[in-house]
Image: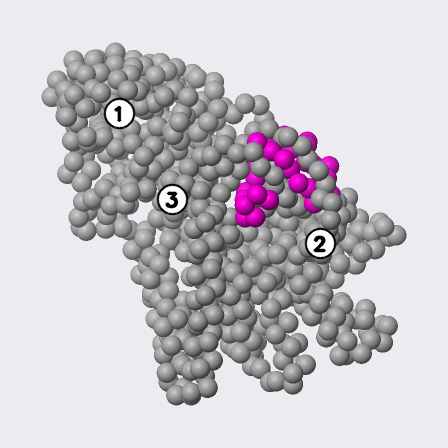
């Protein structure tokens, strides 16, 4: 789209010189693109490979999680970037200088995302030129690199800086490492949750504001020593690329540094460039250096806001804040699905305080800490007050779960926003607000219903949503056994990245019914994540499960805001669009106590079997001799203890759905079950192969969609 707009602009100018320059630039860009494509193709890994190799990695690029580590390094044998994972963090944790790890392990491509609207790690890392990941099985030796390049020295200096900031009082250490070194780890996200909620994360992502401070600090220091203006410009030109490495080499930082450097070069050449000129040249140079950078959300948002600043720099602060938030909104709802109503107010109040008070205080405290530790402690106390205030503000009501608009709709919203900025009037503003309202209503009151089977690995999690969101039910949550407790007390739930992420993308923050089929962790392990992040009206469980202590530990903290409903076979529950076929007796939630539900969605009958074994299937056949289903969720992930030949003949579904993890240790689905399906001429789909499986129905027709195989 940008290319087409560019070509139209070139033709309309009717300038031979511009046309020649454009042709040269396009040829150069195509050559760079061809080289990158060839490089990408050569670096592609098709399957698992066992390797013994050597990897150069910078300790400042390594991240740690308990006893494991990961980071981007360079495979010396292939001279390509590679993501390295290892379980023995102690072996690399004490190094500060660049190291070469001689290791044995497996190299494989990044996994495809297996659920709709899930974060795409494969796309993210490929946009940075990383196409494979190495899992270290054995260390054959580690050595410090002998000969240091300038880049090696800068990374070593960055590591020294990180070690220094880690010694600062908390939370000054978090602010210093994020603001000046570009490090934002899990502790940052946990402690400054309000920053993310209120859309203030841009203050901590090293970009224009930070470069402005660094450049002015450099000029001030050089000015003290009476360095001439011409020399200051040359020193700045040389210093900024080094700061790019020291500060973490982010895309936003690259844009800011290129902008400053282009401005300095223009001054030195005595060329007058407008803000739009500088923006355009920066974008072209950035695309030359990193052609795939515009795939990254941070890059998109950085350039959109920089473009918006060009047209709002003469506005009053309040108006400019509103306009800049409007520019960022289409990107935020498309990528993050939600927005806080207090974001504009928070930006208006916090940005001036941050830029004029907090940033200078942090800089002074970091520099002066060795000789004036008391000042650093005072700043840490002040920052703690700031953290508490921002987190409190972020917890106030106002979080709007907008949902994910269509890509073309998001583009239209952005274009309409730019028209509003171009000329603010009630007509254009009214049209923009109407567009947002219509998109919001379409997402939150969909014409289609769906039955979706999340790929949660080895486990079950199913969403049944009726058209216009008349009823929203979730059966099981997926999850894993939690062995011990994380030192921080925080548990990482996979539902946050799979089912919850998808629910928010389709505008759901409220579930009518959460059904827990039985006690197993692969069905109920992520219940706390669902209950803490979403509003749930009712938790529905088989009678007797309330006597199971492990389940009650998960749900008891949330019973003040949700209702626990106990069920047995043939029971009717108001506003619950399911028939209950099992359990017949009370139990503690073992496989034989599984809740079995049937429903009709999209004029098709469905049956969900939990982990019910074949003995329970036999009881159901005896009790409900007329029971049939078009679509059957096989019991116990396709295990040979369920889905007996008699039961498959009895139900005779058009399609069976298997929810099982890839390469799971139980070898689900079993060969015997698949043979029974084949013998009875029954089709089946499997989350192992198809990823997330979704059946959509309604006014727009009925169809199946598989995440990995399409419609």
Q: Is residue 451 above or below residue 225?
A: above
Q: Distance between the residues labelled 1 and 2?
A: 59 Å
Query: Secondary structure under badge 2?
Result: loop
First reached walking from the N terminus: tag 1 or tag 2: 2
Residue 135 point in image, percent of width and height? 54, 34
Against 506, residue 688 (above or below) is: above
Residue depicted at x 60% and y 68%:
258
Real-space CA distance between mark 3 and mark 2, rounded to the nearest whole angstrom: 45 Å
Expressed as whole percent of the image width and height from the top left, the position of residue 288 reads 51, 66
Q: Kindly report which numbered mark, 1 or 3, lies closer to the viewer in this rendering.
A: 1
Residue 149, numbered circle:
2
Report which residue position mark 1 lands on.
634
Q: Is residue 512 left or right of residue 168?
A: left
Farthest-out residue, front: 77
Please state the extent of the stretch shown in magenta in the rendering: 76-104
Q: In x, y percent, where is residue 40?
A: 46, 52
Asked if one can make out residue 315 in the rendered structure from this viewpoint, the answer is no
The answer to whether residue 414 shows anywhere in this view is yes
Q: Residue at x 75, y 79 (%)?
A: 230
To which quarter of the image does residue 139 belong?
top right
Asked whether residue 99 is drawn in magenta, I would say yes
**Which quadrant does the N terminus fall into?**
bottom left
Q: Circle 1: is it few (<14), some (14-19), or many (20+) Cα within 10 Å? A: many
Tell me if 449 is positioned left or right of 228 in this view.
left
Q: Say whether marks 3 and 2 touch (CB < 8 Å).
A: no
Callout 3 secondary element: helix
User: Which of these two is toward me, 336 or 354?
Assistant: 336
Residue at image mark 3: 502
Mark 1 or mark 3, earlier in chain? 3
Residue 698, image x, y percentages = 19, 47
Looking at the image, residue 702 sits to the left or right of residue 427; the answer is: left
């Amino acid at each position: 789209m940008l290319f087409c707009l560019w070509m139209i602009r070139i033709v309309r100018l009717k300038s031979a010189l511009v046309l020649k320059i454009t042709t040269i630039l396009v040829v150069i860009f195509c050559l760079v693109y061809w080289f990158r494509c060839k490089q990408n193709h050569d670096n592609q890994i098709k399957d698992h490979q066992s390797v013994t190799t050597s990897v150069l990695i910078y300790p400042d690029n390594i991240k740690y999680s308990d006893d494991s580590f990961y980071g981007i390094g360079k495979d010396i044998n292939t001279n390509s970037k590679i993501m390295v994972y290892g379980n023995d963090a102690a072996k690399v944790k004490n190094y500060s200088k660049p190291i070469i790890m001689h290791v044995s392990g497996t190299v494989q491509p990044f996994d495809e995302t297996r659920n709709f609207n899930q974060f795409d790690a494969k796309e993210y890392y490929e946009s940075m030129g990383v196409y494979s990941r190495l899992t270290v099985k054995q260390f054959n030796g580690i050595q410090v690199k002998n000969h240091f390049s300038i880049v090696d020295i800068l990374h070593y200096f960055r590591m020294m800086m990180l070690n220094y900031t880690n010694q600062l009082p908390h939370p000054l250490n978090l602010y210093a490492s994020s603001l000046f070194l570009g490090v934002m780890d899990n502790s940052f996200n946990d402690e400054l949750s309000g920053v993310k909620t209120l859309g203030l994360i841009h203050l901590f992502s090293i970009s224009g504001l930070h470069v402005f401070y660094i450049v002015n600090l450099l000029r001030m220091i050089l000015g003290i020593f009476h360095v001439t203006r011409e020399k200051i410009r040359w020193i700045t030109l040389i210093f900024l690329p080094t700061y790019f490495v020291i500060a973490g080499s982010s895309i936003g930082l690259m844009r800011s540094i290129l902008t400053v450097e282009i401005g300095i070069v223009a001054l030195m050449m005595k060329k007058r460039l407008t803000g739009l000129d500088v923006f355009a040249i920066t974008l072209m140079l950035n695309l030359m250096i990193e052609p795939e950078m515009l795939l990254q959300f941070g890059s998109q948002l950085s350039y959109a806001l920089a473009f918006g600043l060009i047209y709002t720099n003469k506005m009053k602060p309040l108006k400019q804040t509103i306009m800049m938030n409007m520019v960022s909104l289409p990107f935020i709802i498309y990528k993050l699905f939600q927005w806080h109503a207090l974001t504009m107010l928070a930006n208006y109040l916090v940005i001036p305080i941050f830029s004029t008070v907090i940033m200078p205080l942090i800089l002074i405290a970091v520099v002066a800490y060795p000789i004036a530790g008391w000042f650093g402690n005072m700043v840490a106390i002040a920052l703690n007050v700031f953290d508490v205030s921002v987190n409190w503000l972020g917890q106030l009501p106002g979080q709007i779960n907008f949902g994910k608009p269509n890509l073309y709709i998001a583009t239209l919203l952005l274009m309409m926003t730019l028209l509003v900025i171009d000329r603010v009037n009630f007509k254009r503003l009214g049209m923009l607000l109407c567009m947002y309202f219509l998109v919001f209503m379409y997402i939150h009151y969909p014409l289609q219903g769906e039955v979706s089977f999340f790929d949660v690995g080895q486990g079950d999690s199913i969403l049944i949503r009726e058209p216009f969101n008349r009823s929203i039910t979730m059966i099981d949550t997926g999850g894993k056994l939690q062995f011990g407790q994380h030192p921080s007390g925080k548990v990482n739930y996979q539902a946050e990245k799979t089912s919850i992420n998808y629910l928010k993308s389709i505008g759901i923050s409220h579930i009518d019914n959460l059904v827990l089929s039985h006690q197993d962790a692969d069905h109920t392990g992520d219940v706390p994540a669902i209950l803490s992040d979403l509003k749930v009206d009712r938790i529905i469980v088989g009678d007797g499960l309330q006597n199971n202590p492990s389940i009650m530990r998960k749900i008891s903290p949330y019973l003040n805001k949700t209702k626990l409903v106990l069920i047995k076979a043939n029971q009717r529950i108001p506003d619950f669009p399911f028939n209950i076929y099992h359990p017949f007796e009370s139990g503690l939630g073992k496989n034989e106590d599984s809740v079995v539900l049937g429903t009709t969605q999209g004029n098709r009958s469905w049956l969900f079997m939990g982990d019910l074994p074949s003995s329970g299937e036999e009881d159901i056949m005896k009790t409900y001799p007329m029971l049939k289903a078009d679509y059957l969720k096989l019991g116990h992930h396709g295990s040979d203890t369920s889905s007996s030949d008699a039961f498959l003949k009895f139900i005779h579904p058009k399609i069976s759905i298997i929810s099982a993890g890839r390469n799971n240790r139980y070898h689900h689905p079993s060969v015997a079950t698949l043979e029974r399906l084949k013998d009875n001429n029954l089709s089946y789909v499997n989350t192992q192969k198809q990823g997330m499986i979704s059946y959509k129905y309604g006014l727009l027709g009925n169809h199946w969609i598989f995440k990995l195989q399409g419609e």
